Image: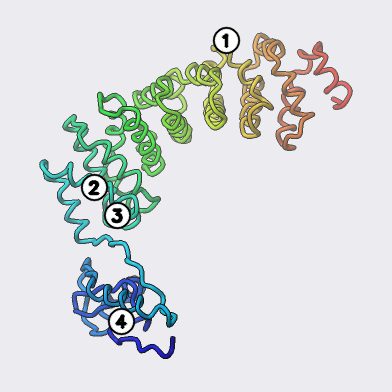
Amino acid sequence: MDEIEIPQYFICPISLQIMKDPVTAVTGITYDRESIEQWLKTAKDTICPVTKQVLPSGSCLTPNHTLRRLIQAWSTENASGGIDRVPTPKSPLCKSRLLKVIRELEVPGLYVNALKKLQVLAKDNSKFMEEAGVPKAMVLLLIRCCNQSKTIGVEQALRILYLTWTPSGEIKAAVNENHRIIDCLTWIQGCDIANPVVVKTLAMQVLKRVIEAENTRLLEKLKPEFMEEMLRVLKLKFSQQATKSALQILIQLCLWGRNRSKIVQANAMFELVELELEKPEKNITELIFNLLAHLCSCADGRAEFLSHAGSIAMVAKRILRVSPATDDQAVHILSLISKNAATKEVLSEMLRVGAVTKLCMVIQADCSTYLKQKAREVLRLHSNLWNNSPCIAVYLLTRYQR
């Protein structure tokens, strides 16, 4: 390879290697793309390394196709001498061109075509598009569609927003500056729209991310109608992903303000127990039990939970049958009920439907120490009432002295 003379203009001025993707800066100097992009990211001043001239912000690096073809032809001819073939690089995304497409979103006759272009680009350029402000543009477009009650372009905008969403300060700022996005994504759930299952599922997935990024003060002020809409999604069950997103949203909201009471008042307990009685997949069950545990931590939640005739039996049946996460939440629910809502009727039902037996089995099973301790505390708390149970007698009277 040392015997082969490499043309000087094939060499990148920065890396001093043969260029694989030659690009020309506005100063007229050609560099290998990877080298100049790295230089511009790390250099204190955005200047041309050779001429020392300032490179304007957002200026494009123009592909030098003629030089690339010459390098490719030369490398092919000298392959026998150890020169590697230079492949044809993918066309990179230029920021100025991307910004031009974003501006087209504001033109009624152009925004649909602009969305099509952005959707194609989003698959391989999500990070670059996020930095260029595409997610914020999608938020504004969706809000505009909602305000005008138009559904054209909603599916594409949701896809682009989902693909370009990254947990960055820019997207959080965009969401916090445009609170109407929550109303918009909720509005989509009630829309008569083409491809409804896909669009409404996408809207739920985006809504979950919005809730995670939203200002907590706004989350505390969400209206009961929002909770009702999330529960309507659970009831309709139009897709497993939408169900999962709705549950995750409700769990997140439980952490703020009076949202637990709002969710309970929206008839959540009945819907959650009914949904679990249909034996959903494991990850859905885990989310249901997580939400039930949150809601049972307040008095009105426990009251609504107990008003469903099958609630305690359902919780008991799931223990040691689904997953350790479900066991954890299920025992926690029974603990909350036995400590804070332990009427004689409730305790008798726990014995009758097998909840007491399951707690005994938790102590015997290969469960975590803290979970066994929690089950043991419940059993000891009401052993006087449950002492006629053969199971409770064995575990309390013979193994654990009181």
Q: Report which residue position mark 3 lands on.
A: 129
Depth check: 208 or 395 in front? 208
* SS for dot 1: loop
Report x, y in % for residue 214.
36, 42
CA gap between label 3 and label 4 equals 31 Å
Amino acid type, mark 3: Met
Q: Earlier in the sequence, mark 3 or mark 4?
A: 4
Q: Nearer the viewer, mark 2 or mark 4?
A: 4
Report x, y in % for residue 301.
52, 21
For mark 3, does the 10 Å Cα neighbourhood hold few (<14), some (14 to 19), or many (20 or more) residues?
A: many
Q: Nearer the viewer, mark 3 or mark 2?
A: 3
Q: Earlier in the sequence, mark 4 or mark 1?
A: 4
Q: Report which residue position mark 2 lands on.
A: 137
Amino acid type, mark 1: Ala
Amino acid type, mark 4: Phe
Q: Earlier in the sequence, mark 3 or mark 1?
A: 3
Is the N terminus in the top left, top right, bottom left or bottom right quadrant?
Answer: bottom left
For mark 2, does the 10 Å Cα neighbourhood hold few (<14), some (14 to 19), or many (20 or more) residues?
A: some
For mark 1, does the 10 Å Cα neighbourhood hold few (<14), some (14 to 19), or many (20 or more) residues?
A: few
> CB under 8 Å between callouts 2 and 4?
no
* SS for dot 2: helix
Is the C terminus in the top left, top right, bottom left or bottom right quadrant?
Answer: top right
CA gap between label 3 and label 2 equals 10 Å
Rendered image quadrant of residue 128:
bottom left
Q: Report which residue position mark 1 lands on.
A: 309
Amino acid type, mark 2: Ala
Q: Report which residue position mark 4 lands on.
A: 10
Residue 69 is marked as none
At a point 35% along the width and 78% down the height, the residue shown is 77
Relative to 108, residue 334 above or below: above
* SS for dot 3: helix
